[in-house]
Each structure stands twice: as structure tokens, then as C-alpha cells.
Amino acid sequence: MTKPLNIAHRGGAGLWPENTLFAFVNAAKAGYDGAELDVQLTRDGRLAVFHDFRLSPALCRRPDGRWVRRNLPLIRDLDFSELAAFDIGRPKPGTLYARRHRKVQAHDGERVPELSSVIRAVRAVKKDFRLFIEIKTSPEDRSLSAPPEAVADAVLACLRETHAMKHCVLVGFDWPALIHAKRAASNVECWFTSMRRRSLRRRPAAWAGGFDPYKFGGSLAQAIKDAGGDGWFPSRQQANARRIAEAQALGLRTGVWTVNGAREMRGFARLGLDAICTDRPDVFRAALG
């Protein structure tokens, strides 16, 4: 059984407030292999590390301490300074997020970080710490986010500026972003995330960037390979032994998200995965060493 990389999902969302410097630095200090995070472009062209396309009622508090509620703006419609005014240091009590992640260690005063800040912070702790950077754009509704190519270009510029290219992997559901990134920088590693099964039936699909799996006999792995991908990064529900073996036979690296149970982690490790993305990297360590 191989030991996959232990990748802390959103910095370890089951342990620390997600997508915060506090989470990423703690994951690096704990000696985990890396972390996954989400990036979006703000109105003033800065790369914010944030998952939802709008401010999250479960995570965002105003400077006066009140939780955000209605008429929430898009991340793309805020300047970074406006976004950074919100406290994201703890989940809102009683929300699904809070119930799902009961062990989260609150850290009030945490702000939405920039990608460059995350890179510098984790490298100061652990130089070989890996970042799986999800380019967060919306193929279903392009008005919700910046164009995928624009976000990809901004990420590449950041990786060049911080000299972090070899320690980062780009991932994402919106394949045009990854296809563009790979064509612009052949040395950047790209693992393609796949959509839910019902989305795979759409012909053609905006997320596929012209590499719809139906053109390849329904094979996601072959579509990713022909699109120039280096790896396949499916959800735990979509991954199975046959699909993983097919991807590996094509020379693709394989990872899976978000796996939080020890038994399931060991099962995926037996399939020879390269990485497991988890909210609970501490459970991974206990299960796999």
C-alpha cells in the first residue's frame, strides 16, 4: 500500500477556520504534506482565497461582529480591501458548517488572505509544503466569477513571482482555466476535477472546454489526457477502482476529495492514489502514519 500525500482540504476545515492563514500555517506546522485552497479574482484584480462566489452567511462577520445575512455581494464585485474587512475566524453557531465541523478551533480576527500571502506563510514554516490551488470560476453562470482564463493568468503570475511553481498543483471543475494555464506554462502541474455524473451528459458542456468525455467514449481519463492534464482529482463518490486504474494506465496522477474517515482513507490508499484531500489531516496521519 502506497502512502498518498496528506492534503488538508481548505487548510483543514475540520480543525481550523477554512481558507485562513491560521489554518494553512497550522497545517504546515503539523507537518502535513500540503493544503487545498480556492482562489477568485476580486474587482481590483487580486487573488482572494475564498470558496463561495458570494460572502458566506456561515463564515462572515462584519466589523461590528454581526453575521452577514441578505443581499450578499459577489467576491468579483468587491475590492480586496472590502472583502478583507470581514472576520472569518469561526463558523456561525447552529449552521450546517458548524455542526459538521465541531472540532474547529476558532481564531477570531482572521481575514480572507491573498494567495501570495498563503504561499509565503507556509513556505516560511515548511519549504516543500504543497498547495493544491482550485481556480474557482463558474462554468454554469459566467456572471458569478471572473473569466477562467483571467484567473489562471493571475495564478500563474503569482506562482512565478513567489517562485512556487514546482510546489503547486492547479485543480478545478472549470477545465478552460486549466487548459489555458497548461498552454501558457507547460511546467505547471494541472489535475482536472470532474463534474457530477448528470453534468457529464450535457453535450457540449461549458466546463469541458471542448474536451467533453463523450468525444472519448465517455472516458474522463482520456479526455483529461488529451486536454493536457497531468492528473485526475475526483470526489470520493466519483472515484472507484476501475476509473482510478484507467487514469493511472494513461499516466495520470490521481487524487480524491474529501475523504474524512480512516477506513475509507486506507481503502483509497490501497488503490495507489497520489493524494487524499481531507478536512481531517490528523485522522489521515493516525490511519496511515
Image: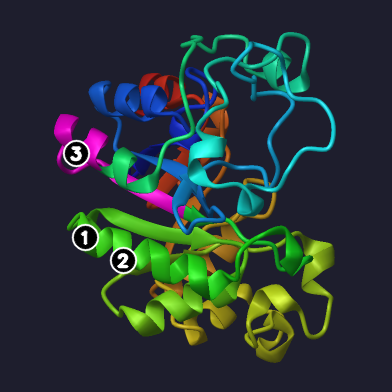
Which residue is more in the foreground, 17 or 71?
Answer: 71
Rounded to the nearest angstrom, the CA distance separating label 3 from label 1 is 14 Å
Q: Earlier in the sequence, mark 3 or mark 1?
A: 3
- Amino acid type at circle 3 is Arg
Marker disc for residue 161: 1
Left/right placement of residue 196 relative to residue 27 reads right
- Whether residues under marks 2 and 1 lie with C-beta atoms below 8 angstroms apart, the answer is yes
Within 10 Å of disc 1 (Cα), the crowding (few <14, some 14-19, many 20+) is few
Residue 98 lies, with reference to residue 46, above or below; the image says: above
Residue at the image point whose x is 78% and y is 66% from the top: 140
Local packing at callout 3 (Cα closer than 10 Å; few below 14, some 14-19, many 20+) is some
Q: Amino acid at mark 1?
A: Glu
Whether the magenta-drawn stretch holds residue 238 is answered as: no
Which mark is first along the chain, 2 or 3? 3
92 relative position to 85: left or right: right
Residue 226 on image: x %, y %: 50, 87
Residue 183's tag is none
Q: Which mark is residue 123?
A: 3
Residue at x 70%, y 14% (from the top left corner): 92
